[in-house]
Structures are given as structure tokens and as C-alpha cells.
Amino acid sequence: MGRAYQNRKESMAKTSDQNARVYSKYSMEIYTCAKSGGADPLGNLALRSLMDRAKKDQVPSHVIQKALEKAQGAGGEDYATARYEGFGPNNCMVIVDCLTDNPNRTFGDVRVCFNKTKNKLGGQGSVMHMFDHCAILVFPGDDEESILETLMMADVDVTDIECEDGKITVFAPHTEYGKTKAALLESLGEIEFEVDEIQFVPQETSPLEGDDIESLEKLIDMLSDLEDVQNVYHSAEY
């Protein structure tokens, strides 16, 4: 698969408004993850990973705790996932993952971002078939064969595994995320993952240069500023 995967785009916040947006995104995502899989990070590896990412992005512990408490209580917001697909410059493919309590508002906001940057919002399924939905785990190491053997012994359906610059990257189907991470932790102990996410990995990339790069970056920035947008994935290669 090479390096054709897009880490979540969360730049370091520099103003209180930007901080508030980042905190709100994480709060919604933690709430939804805890509500669906349980609020105990020891029994919910996806939640544990999400909390670790939040801490790395300097989300205060009280924001995380409040989201967990809200997920354990009755009532509260009812967020739903929403996914939009479209085309950027040079027909590069774009996937926008959202959590929202108002799908109509979110769809309108996302459509404005595409229209203002002269890109095109597509229909459901227009680009999804050109991405693989993968669990991606990156951690220090150089013994690729040993890791592969560990995962095979744990009956993990490994899609691909790479070793480069003292780091091992494991790709597995998104449905195998929990099993994959549990097997690695059991074998290697409490290792620190550089990447620990479920992402959409493009099967093919579209080369961009010049004004096309600027257009895509503007689209990504506008989408990232929307409170409901959690992640933006694309197939562009600069």
C-alpha cells in the first residue's frame, strides 16, 4: 500500500476559537464512541485510541471526562454519522466523515465548501469503491516477519505490513482493528503507536501541482473548520 494514506488533519490550534473547534470535535467523537462501545477504555480499544489522540492534541482531561459522563447518562445529544463523497481538482477523490445532530445543516455546509472552491460534491458511492477502509497501526520496530507471525497466530487478516526507517506499519481491514491492536499489545506490551486509526486509503492517487494543490488545501481547510466534520480523506498526491 505504500505511504498512500492520509493521517487525520488536525493542525495545532493557535487561538481560543480553534481550540474550541478541536475540543468540540473530539467531545462529539468520544461521546459517540463511548455510547456505542462502552465508556471503559480498557474494554473499548477504539475509545482508548481516540482518548490517546485527544491527549496528544492537548484536549483537556475535563473535556474528555465530560464526554464520557454524558455517554453514560440518559438522554443527551443524539449524533449520527454522515459521510459525503466528492471530487477535488484533477478529479482527485474526497471523502468527508462527519458526526452531526442535524444532517440537513451538515450537508448544506459541506456543499458550500465544495462549491466555493469550485470542486464537485458527488452522490453516495461515487468514490467509496476506490478506497480501502483500513485499520492502520504504526509503531517502532524492525522485525517485520516476527510481527506478521504474531498477527497470523492471532488469526488477524493482515492486508499489508511494511518496515521503513525503524517503523513498522500494519494494515488490516477496519473490522479487524480491535483484534489487531490487542494482538500487538499482548505481544509487545504497552507500545506507543505513532498512527493508531481507522482510515480510508486510496487504491489509486491523483497527482496535483500548482493551483490544484492550493484549491484542495482550501477545500480541506474550509471543511476542517466545520464543527461537524471529523475527518477528510483524499486521493491526491502532491
Image: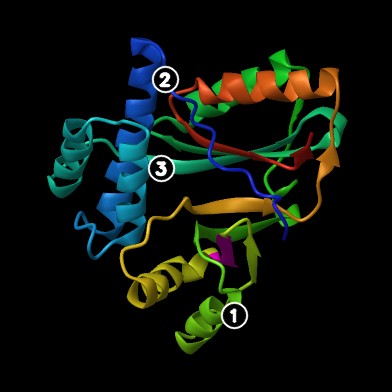
Between the C-alphas of marks 3 and 1, the distance is 40 Å
The kind of residue on which mark 2 rests is Ala
Determine whether the residue tagged by mark 3 lies in a helix, strand or loop.
strand
| Residue 165 found in image quarter | bottom right
Q: Does residue 31 appear left or right of residue 200 in this picture?
A: left
Specify the segment rendered in magenta: 167-173
Q: Mark 2 or mark 1: which comes first in sequence?
A: 2
x then y, percent, for residue 3: 69, 52
**Which quarter of the rendering shows the C terminus?**
top right
Label 1 crowd (10 A; few <14 / some 14-19 / many >=20): few
Mark 1 highlights which residue? Answer: 145
Between the C-alphas of marks 2 and 1, the distance is 39 Å
Label 3 crowd (10 A; few <14 / some 14-19 / many >=20): few
Determine whether the residue tagged by mark 1 lies in a helix, strand or loop.
helix
Q: Mark 2 or mark 3: which comes first in sequence?
A: 2
Residue that appears at 38% across and 31% down = 25
**Which quarter of the rendering shows the N terminus?**
bottom right
| Residue 92 found in image quarter | top right
Mark 2 highlights which residue? Answer: 13
Q: Does residue 9 appear left or right of residue 154 in this picture?
A: right
Q: Nearer the viewer, mark 2 or mark 3?
A: 2
Viewer-closest of 42 and 38: 42
Determine whether the residue tagged by mark 2 lies in a helix, strand or loop.
loop
- Which numbered tag is attached to residue 80? 3
Q: Is 168 colored magenta in this rendering? A: yes
Q: Nearer the viewer, mark 3 or mark 1?
A: 1
Q: In this view of the protein, can residue 9 be seen by the observer?
A: yes
Q: In this view of the protein, can residue 108 be seen by the observer?
A: no
The kind of residue on which mark 1 rests is Glu
